[in-house]
Amino acid sequence: MRTTTKLLTIVLLLAAAIAFSAFTFATPYQRNHILQTSVEDLSSEEEDMLKNINGTWKGSFYVVVGEKKYINDKVTMNFVTKGDNPRLYLTVESCDANYLLPNKWYFEDDKIVYTFNDSPWTAIVSLSFENNKTLVGEYEQYGKKREIRFVRTSSSPIDFEGQPQFMFEDVPAAEWLNKLKEYPNYTKTAVNIPYTYELGKRDKLKSILKTNALDKLVNTKKNDADKMQVLLNWVSTQFRHNGESGMPEKQDALSIMQYSKKMNGVECRGLSIILSEMLRAYGIPAKSVKCAPPDANTVYCHVVVHAYSKELKQWIMLDPTYNLVLKNEQNVYISLPMLRESLINGTKLIPNEGAGRNGRPFYMDFYRAYMTKNCFHFSNAVDSFSGAEGAAANRVITLIPSGYPTTYAYYRNEQPTYSAEEFWKLP
């Protein structure tokens, strides 16, 4: 365990970070992998650069992931410049995608420049030839610049035109979306689900709350949505996501915290249990919710938190794996049923600026595709209390779309319901 002094120092740093970014939201940009300037309008020097850059290039970006922490994020650039529509595709190690698309790319001062990702994670890359096999330049992100170097590995680039950008369990994201669109509705009647929430109980978390001065951090916020984000940010920055960690035998927040320190992180379910229990300690009704794909043979699902805002009279989805909360274009917080509807209808989702897995840049394009796979079934326990996830007598309810031919059992005994109204009812 860390000493009290070290923890308080971290708290002060976190408080500053929260004040700066946790309550503001990102600026989304359009993607365009086609060269911004028409080929006919290029200078002779630009034409030569375009011709010579055709190919596959490998290097890395020096990416900030925390206070004085960086990663070398391996990158592959495929410039497909033969023909009238020169194209650029990026593959970045930290994002599980076949390729990413730049926001734009263009010529500027005898350099090829491109930007990618939404603000505040937007990166600016400028490149010029050192020789025929080497590109050199700058990578700028968060106002910091780093020198970069890329080496040509092939003169025949991979053209991803028409290929799926995201694949999950060997299935293109578009197919997961089609399945979601095929089953958009639920029935309107169901047997009552008697949800309970144990609120204000702090015995097991008392030392954690005191040592980390969380009362001071939380109570400075005037509304419950802001309090949610303070606790979301604290959990996501204190405990790493490690999808290979497994879970401890005892599944209360304190046991999972200790397990996370031992395993250098914990899976999404563990992070969600920690956050939901801490929210309830501050009187906010909250529970972990499993989000799962339609096929029972799939290996992976995702777990997030649903927290209830009494002031806004709505559920708010919090994802501690990605330190994420979402809003729509009307500045309304997104709940899980709203997320599912947005994925089906293609409406815009805007993440908070502090989002990112283990401090890394957040890619909304990836998250949208990822949750399209995982927003078919939803499961949660009837009773929410410390250790609820591991309690054998605690019933688990699974919400299934109307007309879907099979029930779904993942790793727990789950009872089906087809009523979204009952499943998502307010506390």
Image (cartoon, grey):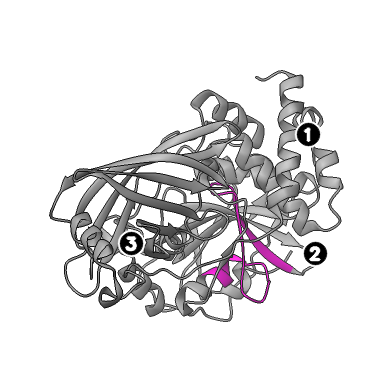
Name the amino acid, label 1: Leu
Identify residue for label 3: 295
Q: Which residue is label 2 attached to?
A: 310
Marks 2 and 3, Cα distance to the nearest angstrom? Answer: 35 Å
Of residue 227 and residue 137, the one placed in the foreground of this image is 137
- Residue 320 screen position, x and y as percent: 59, 47
The range drawn in magenta is 314-339
**Residue at the image point whose x is 28% and y is 52% from the top:** 77
Q: Of tags 1 and 3, which is closer to the observer?
A: 1
Which secondary structure, mark 1?
Answer: helix
Q: Residue at x 16, y 67 (%)?
A: 82
Amino acid marked by disc 2: Lys
Mark 2 crowd level (few <14, some 14–19, many ≥20, 10 Å Cα) = some
Residue corresponding to mark 1: 209
Marks 1 and 2 in Cβ contact (< 8 Å): no
Q: Earlier in the sequence, mark 1 or mark 3?
A: 1
Pinpoint residue 284: horizontal percent, then vertical percent. Answer: 77, 53
Is disc 1 in contact with disc 3, using a CB cutoff of under 8 Å?
no
Whether the magenta-drawn stretch holds residue 333 is answered as: yes
Q: Earlier in the sequence, mark 1 or mark 2?
A: 1
